[in-house]
């Protein structure tokens, strides 16, 4: 299993460099995209032939995790290609845009949903954010968890307990008060679960967490980098 970083910033990118949240998972030649923030479509096209993509998971419907879905529709129309989009159902204009486009096959998910997506098994875990947000557990050759956006909650350790790798929103500075985990929480989780590869993402344009992670095993997600799970 491999994880490629299409974008690692939120809620907006760093000047000259930053794409918002988006990630590509490969397992035995099958693919799933996790979120599709601004700038990620062009990077996705560098990694794969879009016609090989069948599955997209959207953790929550904030713009920095969904922005490129709008322009992705144009490409799908040109290619006459349809993708499955897994996300929770909600009464919002964004959700209506998703479900009414013929090239998006939207599949509603909750914590009880189990899905077989080619060589991968998908399940979903509620997280805690300003809107409804789900983590995804992907079981293939290895097990990967992507938290989406969240503060620390009881389900975060549960994800670590069953995963080989966790891609986590945990890059905010010490003392940060907001709906995201901090570098302190990342370091604590890394110490408690040393056998789990922790990749920190959702970077701020004005804060680099690398120094905080220097003496730890926490990996900072780098744009266009690929990691073996």
Image (cartoon, grey):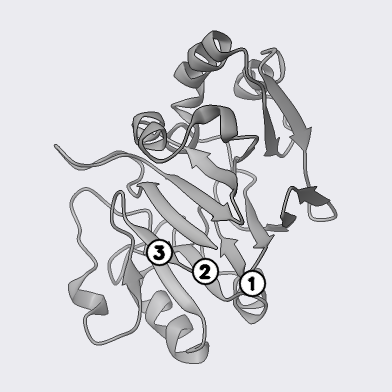
> Which circle marks residue 159 in the picture?
1
Name the secondary structure under disc 1: helix
Task: Out of 56 and 52, give the one closest to the viewer.
Answer: 52
**Residue drawn at 36 percent across, 40 percent down:** 20
Q: Position of residue 184 (x, y in %)?
A: 36, 78
Q: Which residue is mark 2?
A: 166
Task: Out of 137 and 212, give the one closest to the viewer.
Answer: 137
Look at the image and tell me in which quarter the N terminus lies: bottom right
| 1 and 2 marks in contact (CB < 8 Å) | yes
For marks 2 and 3, give the one nearer the viewer: 3
**Residue drawn at 49 percent across, 15 percent down:** 75
Residue 177's place in the image compared with 159, above or below, is above
Residue 98's place in the image compared with 157, above or below, is above
- Crowd class of label 3 (few under 14; some 14 to 19; many from 20; radius 10 Å): some
The residues bearing labels 2 and 3 have C-alpha atoms spaced at a distance of 12 Å
Q: Which residue is mark 3?
A: 227
């Amino acid at each position: 299993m491999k994880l490629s970083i299409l974008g690692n910033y939120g809620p907006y990118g760093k000047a000259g460099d930053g794409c918002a949240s988006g990630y590509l998972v490969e397992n035995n030649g099958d693919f799933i995209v996790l979120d599709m923030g601004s700038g990620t479509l062009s990077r996705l096209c560098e990694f794969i032939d879009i016609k090989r993509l069948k599955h997209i998971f959207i953790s929550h419907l904030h713009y920095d995790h969904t922005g490129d879905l709008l322009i992705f529709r144009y490409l799908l129309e040109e290619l006459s290609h349809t993708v499955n989009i897994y996300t929770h159902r909600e009464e919002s204009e964004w959700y209506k845009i998703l479900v009414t486009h013929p090239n998006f096959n939207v599949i509603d998910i909750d914590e009880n949903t189990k899905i077989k997506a080619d060589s991968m098994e998908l399940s979903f875990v509620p997280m805690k954010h300003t809107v409804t947000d789900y983590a995804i557990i992907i079981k293939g050759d290895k097990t990967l968890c992507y938290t989406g956006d969240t503060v620390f909650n009881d389900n975060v350790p549960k994800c670590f307990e069953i995963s080989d790798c966790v891609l986590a929103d945990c890059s905010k500075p010490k003392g940060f008060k907001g709906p995201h985990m901090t570098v302190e929480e990342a370091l604590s989780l890394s110490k408690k679960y040393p056998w789990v590869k922790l990749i920190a993402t959702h970077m701020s344009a004005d804060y680099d967490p690398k120094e905080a992670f220097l003496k730890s095993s926490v990996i900072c997600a780098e744009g266009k980098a690929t990691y073996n799970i």
